[in-house]
Amino acid sequence: MMKAVVFKEAGKKLEVREVPRPKAGPGELVFKVGACGICASDIHATEVPGMLPPGQVLGHECAGEVVEVGPEVAGDWKVGDRLLSLPMKVCGTCPACQGGDFTQCSAMIIQGFDLRFPGGYAEYAPAFAAMAMKIPPELDVRDAAVIEPLAVGLNAYRTAQVPPGSDVVVVGAGVIGLALANWARFFGAGSVAVSEVVPARIERARKLGVDLVIDAGSCENPAAEFERSTGRPCTVIFECIGRPIIQKLIDMAPSNTHLVVVGAGMQPEQLTPFPAAMKKIRITFALGYDPADTAFVMRMLVAGRISASSLVSATTGLEEVPEMFAALQKPNDHCKVLIVT
C-alpha cells in the first residue's frame, strides 16, 4: 500500500488515501516519485463533471527513481535509474504512432486522467517505458519535474511557426506563459510582452527580463498597450489562461494577428467567427508536446541555457496537497507548485 491523493467528484476536495501500490505490467516501470508538478489542467479537470473518474490519482508531471522493471520492457532500464515519465501510453502501431505523432495515437491513455494509468500525486507511480526518459546525473529531480510545462511551451512555439523577429504578446504569466516567453526570447522574437493580473506573477515576469510587462488589472487590451508602447502592432498572441477568453482576444487583436491557443480550456466558449475573418486572424490550437521537445528541454537545462527552478514558487508534501490544490483553484500568486515526496 501507499499514500496517494485521490479525486472524488467535481467540486469536492481531493483526499489523501491509502491505495494499492502499482505493479509493473508488460512494458511498464514503477518508480518512487521524487517530485510531481500540480498542473492547471488537473485543476480544470476536477472542476468539470465527467472529466475524471472517481478514485483517480492525479499527476502527469512527475520524475523519480525506478523501483520495479516489468516484463517486455524495451531498453536497458534497471532499478535505481532516475526517470522522467512522459505521461502517455501509446499503441505504437497506429498511423499516428508510426509517423511519430504520438499525441494523436488512436488508443492513447493519459496518465492521471484514466484509472488504468494512475498519476504522480502518490508515493509510487507507473511509467510506460517506451515513453520515459532517463534523467542525466547533472539534473536535479525537481528540475526534471518541470520539463513537462517547459516542453508544452516549446511545442506551442514550434507549432505556431513564429518567424524570427516577430512581436509576441503572451496572455497569462503562469508557468506555461512564462515558459513561452522564455522560448520566444530564446528563438529570437522581436519584442516580447507578458500580460498578467496577479501582482506576484507580474513581478515574476519582470524578473524574467521580457521587454514589456502589462498589468491586465489596469489595462483591458494588452494588444493595444503593446502597440502604444512599441509603436508596432503585435504579430502573435499566445493565450495561456485556459479560461473562456478567445472571443475577447479576437476582438482586441490587430489585423493579421496569429492567435495561438495554448491554455487547454475545458469550459464551453462561444465564438463569433466574423470578426476574426474580417481581420484575417489565424487561430492555431497547441496542446502537449512530443519526445523530441522533452529531449531538447532536458539538453538545454543541462547546458544551463534555460532555468526550471526559477518557475517553481512552492513545494508541498502529499498530506498538504488537498489544501494546496484548493488554494490553486482560486486566484493565487503561484507559478509552479511541486509535490515533493
Image: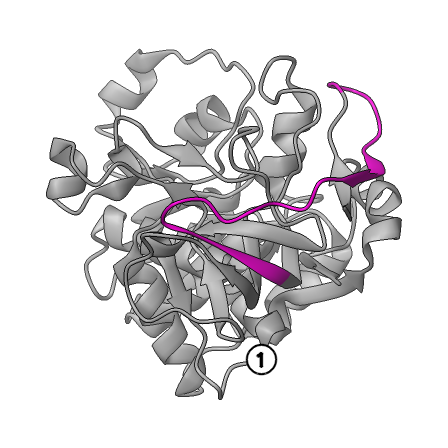
- Residue occupying image coordinates x 80% and y 37%: 330
State the residue in front, 40 or 89: 89
On the question of residue 214 being in view, the answer is yes
- Queried whether the magenta region covers residue 251, the answer comes back as no
Q: Amino acid at mark 1?
A: Asp
> Whole-percent x and y of residue 221?
53, 39
Image x and y of residue 176, in percent: 51, 53
Q: Is residue 28 left or right of residue 328?
A: left
Q: Which residue is labeled 1 in the image? A: 140
In this picture, is 217 found above or below 75?
Answer: above
Residue 285, percent across and down?
33, 34
Identify the residue at the far front of this view.
71
Magenta-span inclusion, residue 12? yes
> Which sits in the foreground, 123 or 220?
123
In the picture provided, is 82 more to the left or to the right than 100? right
Secondary element type, mark 1: loop
Q: Which residues are magenta?
A: 9-32
- 279 or 74: nearer the eye? 74
Q: Is 124 drawn above or below residue 314 in the view shown? A: above
The answer to whether one can see residue 194 in this image is: no
Quarter location, residue 74? bottom left
Say which residue appears at 53% left-offset and 49% top-offset.
126
Q: Is residue 37 left or right of residue 161?
A: right
